[in-house]
Image: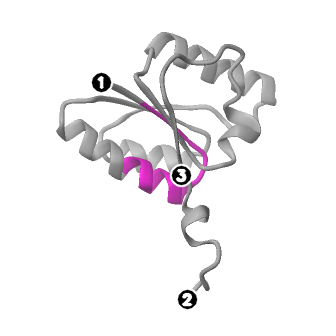
Amino acid sequence: MRFLFLVTGLGEAAQGTAVALYAREKGADVKFVSTTTVCHDYIAGFGFKDSLYSDELPTAELRDHVDRTIEEYSPDVIFCCNSKTTDKMFLPKKKPSCPIVSLDSNWLFEDMPAF
């Protein structure tokens, strides 16, 4: 199995990394695409392959990079780790043939107090 994680937030990077650690333990090949150096450094700390594309790139260029990564890597599952991945990062021109899963910490905790 090949898992591709698209990450735009550190909380979601942590969630994606937790899933990725389990998947890697079970023999899956895992790759990340992130848009911030903080996320990139966090992910790399666990030894995962990560392509860092700046969230400062024009939307079309960022989406082209992600589309190309999907085409080249050919994942069995895509994890969108943050609802914002569909704002700027992930809106493929061609629908991927694999399942697309979403992880977002805001959906889990949005109605809870900060402390």
Q: x, y (%) of residue 73?
A: 44, 16
Q: Residues within 10 Å of mark 2 (few under 14, many from 20)?
A: few
* Kind of residue at badge 2: Phe
Q: CA distance from mark 1 to mark 3?
A: 27 Å
Who's the residue at 18% across and 40% down the image?
25
Can the viewer see residue 4 in this picture? yes
Give me the disc on residue 115: 2
Residue 16 included in the magenta stretch of the image: yes
Q: Quadrant of the C terminus?
A: bottom right
Q: CA distance from mark 1 to mark 2?
A: 38 Å
Instruction: Tell which residue pokes out farthest to the bottom in this image.
Output: 115
Q: CA distance from mark 2 to mark 3?
A: 23 Å
Magenta residues, as a range? 4-17
Q: x, y (%) of residue 61?
A: 75, 22
Q: x, y (%) of residue 104?
A: 56, 55
Discs 1, 2 touching: Cβ within 8 Å: no
Q: Of residues 30 and 39, which is closer to you in this image?
A: 30
> Mark 1 or mark 2, which has the lower sequence index?
1
Residue 59 higher or lower than 15, as above or below = above
Which residue has dot 3 on it?
A: 38
Who's the residue at 61% across and 85% down the image?
113
Query: Based on the displayed image, in which of its 4 quarters is residue 62 positioned?
Result: top right
Tell us which disc is closer to us: 2 or 3. Answer: 2
2 left or right of 62?
Answer: left
